[in-house]
Amino acid sequence: MRTRFSVSVVSVAAAVLLAGCSGGSAPSTSPGATNAPPSSSAAGKTLPYAGAPKVEHPLPESVLSVHPCDSALTPEQVKTLLGKPTQGEHADNPALGAECHWSNRDAGSLATVLYTTKVADGLSAVYANTKPQSKLWRPLAPIQGLPAVAASVYEQQAAKNSFCQVTVGISDQKTIDASVTLGYSQIGKKDPCDAAAVVADMVVTNLKQKAGA
């Protein structure tokens, strides 16, 4: 059953989904784990394939030219999400692309953005490779006109209640991932996929501004 979520109905006030007030260390989840497609385009296949939706209004790939630590989220957006100003940490994935983590260690919350520039097949690769591994798979309503899907490979209920990754197709060839681990006080109260969709919406807003869209 397809579950649809419209980011447009999420208010700015509701965007504070990751911050908490409990003490502790940062979570040990691997935010990029739900997206592990091959590094080359599937030979002889026309995009999109594997049931992936077509990106009708793509953004230029040049919007991904600046590292996500410096372009995905503004300092104010990070503060809104995590409850305090936080410096992004480079966590690049050689097989996928440039990646950035922002964490609130006191709250146990984490937000990650990955620009998947090393894979040529965009959402098609995600549908072909990530979907069969996913314990959670939720196609979403388009985020500002761009197709998106929420997923998690984690089988344990505790992990599924706290972690989710949203992948957005900015073109038929390229995607961005926004993943979250909820703060301790938010687990069981907030849907991590809704939280990840809020982060993805913020990233898309910034990328569209860069593209002049």
Image (spheres, rainbow, N blue to C red):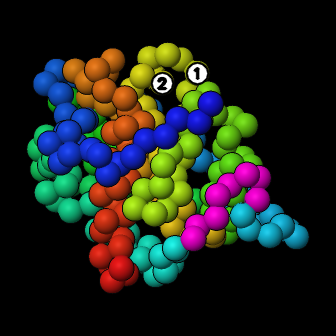
In the displayed structure, 35 sits above or below 60; it is above
Quarter holding residue 132: top right
Are dots 2 and 1 in contact, CB under 8 Å?
Answer: yes
Q: Is residue 51 magenta?
A: yes
Q: What element carries label 2?
A: helix
Question: Left or right: where does residue 46 sit relative to residue 88?
Answer: right
Write the residue at 42% across / 22% down.
161
Tell me which segment is drawn in magenta: 49-56
Quadrant of res 5: top left
Asked whether, in this view, residue 45 is left or right of residue 123, the answer is right
In front here: 206 or 140? 140
Q: In this view, does 90 lie above or below 186?
A: below
Q: Residue, x 52% and y 52% (percent of image)? A: 148
- In the foreground, 181 or 28: 181
Earlier-in-chain disc, 2 versus 1? 1
Percent x, y for residue 40? 74, 66
Residue 204 lies in the magenta-colored region: no
Amino acid on which disc 1 is placed: Glu
Residue under pointer 1: 155
Which element type, helix, strand or loop, lies under badge 1?
A: loop
User: Residue 44: percent from the left, percent from the top?
Assistant: 88, 70
Callout 2 amino acid: Lys
Q: Name the residue under label 2.
A: 160
